Amino acid sequence: MNALPGVLCGILLAAVSLAAPLSIRAAGVAIDSVPLETDENGEFDVRVTLVCAGCTSTSYLRGVFYIGGTKYFGYTKHPDGSWVNAPGGNCTQYIPVLSDMLSPEGTWSGAVTVKPDKESPLYEGPGEYLFKIGRYTGSCSVSWSPEQTVRITGPTPTPSPTPTATPAPPPVPTATPAPQISPAPTATPVETPPPTEIPQSPAASGRTLDKTGSVAGIFRSSDTFSESFRAGTPAGQATSGSLLLGSEPPSAYIISILLIGAGLGCACLGFTLRNVRQGV
């Protein structure tokens, strides 16, 4: 009889040890089909299996990204199409899984759509992050799936082009001023004086000595002779009474002829007076 209590204690401990794994499995979450990387603007589906044997209340599912600790970010797509990133204290905003949605074995499987929240202060840019799915109860207590690593990629920054040094423009040659060409001096036209017209004496018209026998008649005759001579008229054909001088007499010849004429006149006058006195 004393051994009975020990046997009962052993049976009780065995029952507790067997019941413990069942309780753990009753609130377990498994994930599958998690991509190795995703774009910061992209989204992806995760295959989730919820094990909740004996659950009589609604469960809520949420996907999160994080680096470490308990600070999470990321969006979970609600069945109504909206994106939710509420904190854990507002867990009822996430994907609801009703108790009557569980199979007779107490499991549920489905896809959960998630994406990064690049506007969150917890997002540090492209890189590797941890990812997991949480199952919340109505009182917002949570149990998590095993975590996996997801690389979040972003747009590749376009490298700034290295500025190409622009060669300095060649120096502009200084224009040499063209030499000033002085205009050629204008030749002053030499005015040629008009030819002096030598007045022709009346004798040049070919007249002979006039009847008075004056000196002017003599000069006119000489002029006529000179003109005839220059024109090629023989000396023997000169007009009678003409004086052969060969050319127009210079002024000395004229004076001599005047003196000779005056002397002859005086001689004739004296000869005439003498004859008169003698009674001739």
Image: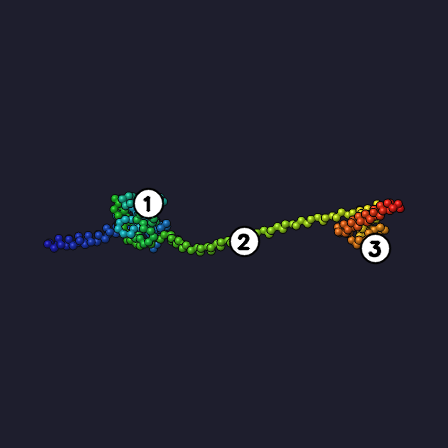
Q: Which residue is identified by label 1?
A: 84
2 or 3: tag closer to the N-terminus? 2
Q: Which residue is identified by label 2?
A: 179
Q: Where is residue 17 in the image (x, y as percent from the top left)?
A: 20, 54
1 or 2: tag closer to the N-terminus? 1
- Residues 125 and 113: in front is 125
Residue beneath the point at 60% across and 51% down: 185
- Residues 175 and 31: in front is 175
3 or 1: tag closer to the N-terminus? 1
Task: Tell which tag, 2 or 3, sits nearer the viewer.
Answer: 3
Furthest toward the right, the residue is: 280
> CA gap, disc 1 to disc 2?
88 Å
> CA gap, disc 2 to disc 3?
73 Å
Label 2 is placed on what type of residue?
Answer: Pro
Residue beneath the point at 84% across and 50% down: 241
Image mark for residue 235: 3
- Residues 109 and 270: in front is 270
